[in-house]
Image (tube, rainbow, N blue to C red):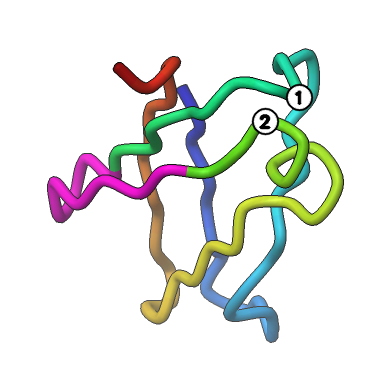
Amino acid sequence: MIQVFRRADSIYRQADLKLRGLDPDKTYAITDLDTNSVTRRQGRALMEQGLPLEIARKPGAALLTYSLAQ
């Protein structure tokens, strides 16, 4: 589970969240629980480039889950 917060005075709208401890050769499904959208990314990309995440509202929050893709 990934939970991210954007504070009311934050100037940052987007971040690339580098995940750790994943299998670099497996594909992961990332679900945005606010929109129910699902994206699939390789473990290596999630650990090296990161997961791009944008929170437009201030203050705001995002809640995502990730698991091995089926």
Please give the range of residues in magenta. Answer: 32-40
32 or 68: which is nearer to us?
Answer: 68
For residue 13, above or below residue 61: below
- The earlier-in-sequence mark between 2 and 1 is 1
Secondary structure beneath label 2: helix
Residue at horizontal 42%, vertical 17%?
Answer: 67
Residue at horizontal 67%, vertical 30%?
Answer: 43
Residue 28 percent location from the top left of the image: 48, 28
Residue at horizontal 49%, vertical 71%?
Answer: 54
Give the residue furthest to the bottom: 11
Tag of residue 24: 1
Judging by the rendered image, the residue that carries numbered circle 2 is 43
- Whole-Å distance between the Cαs marked 2 and 1? 4 Å
Q: Quadrant of residue 70?
A: top left
Residue at horizontal 21%, vertical 40%?
Answer: 33
Amino acid type shown at disc 2 = Gly
Residue 20 percent location from the top left of the image: 79, 23
Residues under numbered marks 2 and 1 in contact, where contact means CB atoms less than 8 Å apart: yes
Q: Is residue 50 left or right of residue 64?
A: right
36 or 12: which is nearer to us?
Answer: 36
Secondary structure beneath label 1: loop
10 Å crowding of disc 1: few (<14), some (14-19), many (20+): some
Residue 4 percent location from the top left of the image: 53, 46
Q: Is residue 49 left or right of residue 68?
A: right
Give the residue furthest to the front: 25
Q: Quadrant of residue 23?
A: top right
Residue 16 percent location from the top left of the image: 71, 60
Tag of residue 12: none
10 Å crowding of disc 2: few (<14), some (14-19), many (20+): many
Report the label total. Answer: 2
Asked if the magenta segment contains residue 62, the reply would be no
Amino acid type shown at disc 1 = Pro
